Image (cartoon, rainbow, N blue to C red):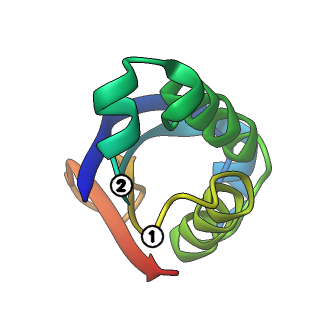
Amino acid sequence: MGLIQIEDMEFYAFHGHFKEEQIVGNKFLVDISLDVDCTKPAESDSLKDAVDYQKVYRLIKHEMTQKSFLLENICKRLLDVVFQNFPEVRKATIKVRKMNPPMGGRIGSVSVMLEREW
């Protein structure tokens, strides 16, 4: 098995429980780890045998444009799209961080991490 990680994908999006959050927006960081068998692409050195990181990014970018109230929902949707598009993924972990959340004080970020096995 191999572990593919795409880290610190940055998006400006309009997620949040409060109406103001869905109007003003905020910065979000997304990390994903994918457990896959890397034997074939390691031998062939061909993208057709590998998980295409660019496609993973594009799918996540698209999902981040769809408003959600909760980080938990964003994580679930991101896992759904990964497993729908990459049957070779056996396990995935997603972490979504909301930067400077409006919680009444100075907070760098709040995050949710979900994991799913196939």
In the displayed structure, would residue 33 be above or below residue 41? below
Residue on which the image places disc 2: 37
Q: Residue at x 46, y 80 (%)?
A: 116
98 left or right, relative to 63: left
The Cα atoms of the two marked residues, 2 and 1, are separated by 8 Å
Disc 2 + disc 1, Cβ < 8 Å: yes
Location of the N terminus by quadrant is bottom left
In the displayed structure, would residue 88 be above or below residue 116? above
The number of discs equals 2
Observer-side mark, 2 or 1, equals 2
Residue on which the image places disc 1: 90
Secondary structure, mark 1, is loop
Return the residue nearer the eye: 69 or 53.
Answer: 53
Q: Quadrant of residue 90?
A: bottom left
Q: Quadrant of residue 38?
A: top left
Please provide percent x and percent y for residue 82: 62, 56
The amino acid marked with disc number 2 is Asp
Q: Residue furthest bottom?
A: 117
Please provide percent x and percent y for residue 12: 57, 30
92 left or right, relative to 107: right
Q: Residue at x 41, y 31 (%)?
A: 9
Secondary structure, mark 2, is loop
75 left or right, relative to 59: left
Crowdedness near tag 2: few (<14), some (14–19) or many (≥20) residues, C-alpha within 10 Å = some
Please provide percent x and percent y for residue 75: 54, 66
The amino acid marked with disc number 1 is Arg
Question: Which of the two discs, 2 and 1, labels the residue nearer the N terminus?
Answer: 2
